[in-house]
Image (tube, rainbow, N blue to C red):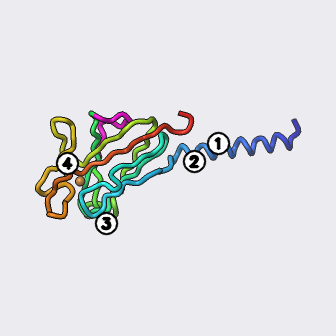
Amino acid sequence: MSSTRLFVGLIIVTLGFGISNTIYAAPPIARQVIVPGEDRFSPFAITIRSGQSVQWVNLDTDDHTVVSNDFFNTAGHNGTNVLLKGTDSNGGVPGTFILHFSHPGTFVYYCRFHAHLDNFHQPAAPGPDGGIQDQNGNFGTPMNGIITVLPGPGQ
Ligand SMILES: [Cu+2]
């Protein structure tokens, strides 16, 4: 092998390591779930691919939480119970939280401040002052959401 070919080969190997290091250090955020200035996750349901990440962003002034409903969850991250700070308790900036999903399944979650699980493991509104408010001022809908994780490339 000539020294020129060896040199070119080393550059390619070096570039290859650089690219893969970048990918593994910062998995791309595929989708965001926003908490607007009220007690709900938006959108309620999202679909991603295995290998992708979801970022929650709390734009509300109030704190919220992301709690996994492990009776139904098959996409991992069982036991998730994270405080998602609102701007009032986070120095004026939205609190954020990221989960990376590495295999297909379903991730069902709720906010424990604005929903609780009933005897059938279904989210229920805490009422009368929590959850999503309807046109009549009633808080009948619990704050919850669902992520469907489809197989990723090559799965
Ligand atoms: Cu909440």
Which residue has dot 1 on it? Answer: 17
Which residue has dot 4 on it? Answer: 115
Where residue 92 is drawn, which disc sits there? Answer: 3
Q: CA distance from mark 1 to mark 2?
A: 9 Å
| 83 sits left or right of 124 in the view | right
Residue 75 position by quadrant: top left
Q: Is ligand 1 closer than 8 angstroms to the Cβ of mark 4?
A: yes
User: How would you rate the neighbour count of disc 4 (Cα within 10 Å): few for under 14, some for 14-19, many for 20 or more?
Assistant: many
Which residue has dot 2 on it? Answer: 22
* Main SS, magenta residues: loop
* Of labels 3 and 4, the one closer to you: 4
Q: Earlier in the sequence, mark 3 or mark 2?
A: 2
Magenta includes 81?
A: yes
Q: CA distance from mark 4 to mark 1?
A: 46 Å
Secondary element at tag 2: helix
Write down the region rendered in magenta.
Answer: 72-82
